[in-house]
Image (cartoon, grey):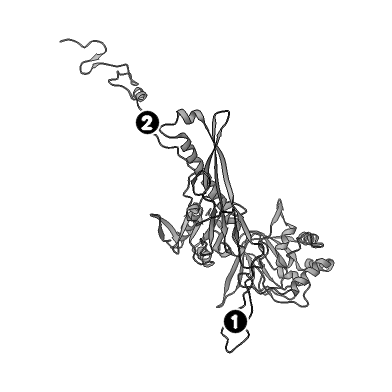
Amino acid sequence: MTEPTTGQTAENGPAGPAGPTGRPRLALGTGAARNLATTTKSVPQMQGITPRWLLRLLPWVQVDAGTYRVNRRLTYQVGDGIVSFVNDGADVRVVPPELAELPPLRGLADPAVVEGPAVLEGLAARFEQREYAPGETIAAAGRPVDGVHLIAHGKVEETGPGRYGGEARVRILAGGRFFGEGALLGAVAGEGGESGESGEGGEGGEGGEGVEWPHTFRALTPSIVLTLPLAAIEELTERSGALRAHLEEYRDTPPPPQTRHGEAAIEVASGHDGEPVLPATFADYETSPREYELSLAQTMLRVHARVADIYNGPMDQVEQQLRLTVEELRERQEHELVNNRDFGLLHNADLRQRLQTSGGPPTPADMDELLSRRRKSRFFLAHPKTIAAFGRECTRRGVYPSCVEVEGRRVQAWRGVPIYPCDKIPITPAGTSSILVLRTGEDDQGVIGLRRTGLPDEVEPGLSVRFTGVDDRALLTYLVSTYYSAAVLVPDALGVLENVEIAR
């Protein structure tokens, strides 16, 4: 019998070089085979792509002139009703011009008002800083009004006597809000009046000696409150003729007829008999309506001509570069619609539509209160972690939110209103966030998106890619632009649940 020669096996013939294990290979290896093969490749992936529900759900309105004007009935609300503070370590001070947010002091921040800014500085210097633990009473119902209180930090609960005994919650005030501003009028009032509601910022009416708090104010969280004592108010009023004259003018000027929404009233007669003289009226308009200019997001995309020419298969390099760039622009567009200080939804919610959570995490009761402030709520918008926190609160109470079907997928909802995730809503370092609820569309006087379509070199509605040439380094350059904004047609179209705690 003939023996196999060196390099052969009895069964398979010639053997190849030794493999990784030291034994001879019997076939071509995969490493060498790849030299003759192609690979199946994915398109470039990107982690930053999100569902962008806000861009998909907003009704978009074409803006041909670059500016969208929102005409409304005349309203008498001035300012935002929120006071700002500065701190130096643990010491907190109110910014003097911000005191003009208190209704009795409105107008004093105007430099044209004689001694106005100086009066506000004098008032700001007399505020005393006080700290309260959770559950501690700041002002008790039935006790004399002791001054003006500004909430610099924390949450304060206002309660009053319930219809059937016990206490009923009136509202929750957060940082920047105030109450007791009616005490400013006590120093110029001929005789004390009853303290009552005088605006969105806090508790107003006439104050002074002998006037009692109608409600109780109690700290829900560790709170810092700046208080202007009644004695300081009386002293400053005696020393400053400008302050006294301003407060007397405010006291003696009757408020103009207005609706509960703050709009100029339209007089209407109803339920009458005979031939009475009917009221004459007209609908007054705002003389300086809000105008929204289209904002933009732009970038210059550069691609080397060599890359575009010889590394262009099987995928078009320019096309993939543009695709990823457009995705990033759309993400920035949604971020701006939420966070931009000029037109972003978080900064354009009306003060009366900003609510505080009852305890910290978002509860079913908080969501119900948010829904009760408007008609035809279309959807909620919240950070995914906020949605998870709401789910935990529902589980803790044995409540199971329903789901609705949107575009073939099931979305968590509350009272039939879908809750969409949006990671553009910020989370503060303290672990708090916000929940938005919107009514949308021009026909429903809601929130709308603004854009300009029909642009040169448009690749998507409102987004254009314009080739700008090749430079002396053989770089192809493309200008990628998108134009957008958002408008809130009436204040109750947008609501915000603020300071939502998601850390527990």
Q: First in sequence: mark 2 or mark 1? A: 2
Is residue 322 placed above or below 237 in the rendered structure?
above
**Compared with residue 476, is residue 160 higher up or lower down, i.e. above or below?**
below
442 relative position to 22: left or right: right
Q: Residue furthest bottom?
A: 274
Q: Is residue 37 left or right of residue 367?
A: left
Asked whether residue 431 appears in the rendered view, the answer is no
Residue 23: quarter of image? top left
SS assignment at label 1 = loop
**What residue sits 20% from the left and 18% below the top?**
11
Residue 442: x, y in percent?
52, 62
Between circles 2 and 1, the one closer to the viewer is 1
Tell me the residue at 56%/84% (across/down): 271
Image position of 462 with respect to 231: above or below:
above
Residue in view at x 35 percent, y 26 percent: 37
Quick one: which residue is furthest to the left in this view? 1
Residue 391 percent across, percent down from the top left = 46, 57
Name the spot of residue 41 as percent of width and height, x first.
Answer: 39, 34
Which of the pair 67/174 is nearer the observer? 67
Q: Secondary structure at mark 2?
A: loop
Q: Residue at 54%, 51% (x, y): give it.
A: 452
The image quarter containing residue 102 is: bottom right
Q: Name the residue type under label 2.
A: Thr
User: Residue at label 1?
Assistant: 269
Q: Amino acid at mark 1?
A: Ala
Numbered badge on residue 444: none
Please, is residue 229 above or below residue 309 in the view?
below
Task: Choose between 187 and 210: the one closer to the eye.
Answer: 187
Instruction: Name the residue beneath numbered marker 2.
Output: 39
In the rendered image, which quarter contains the N terminus? top left
Position of residue 315 measured from the top left corner of the image (x, y, whole percent):
42, 34
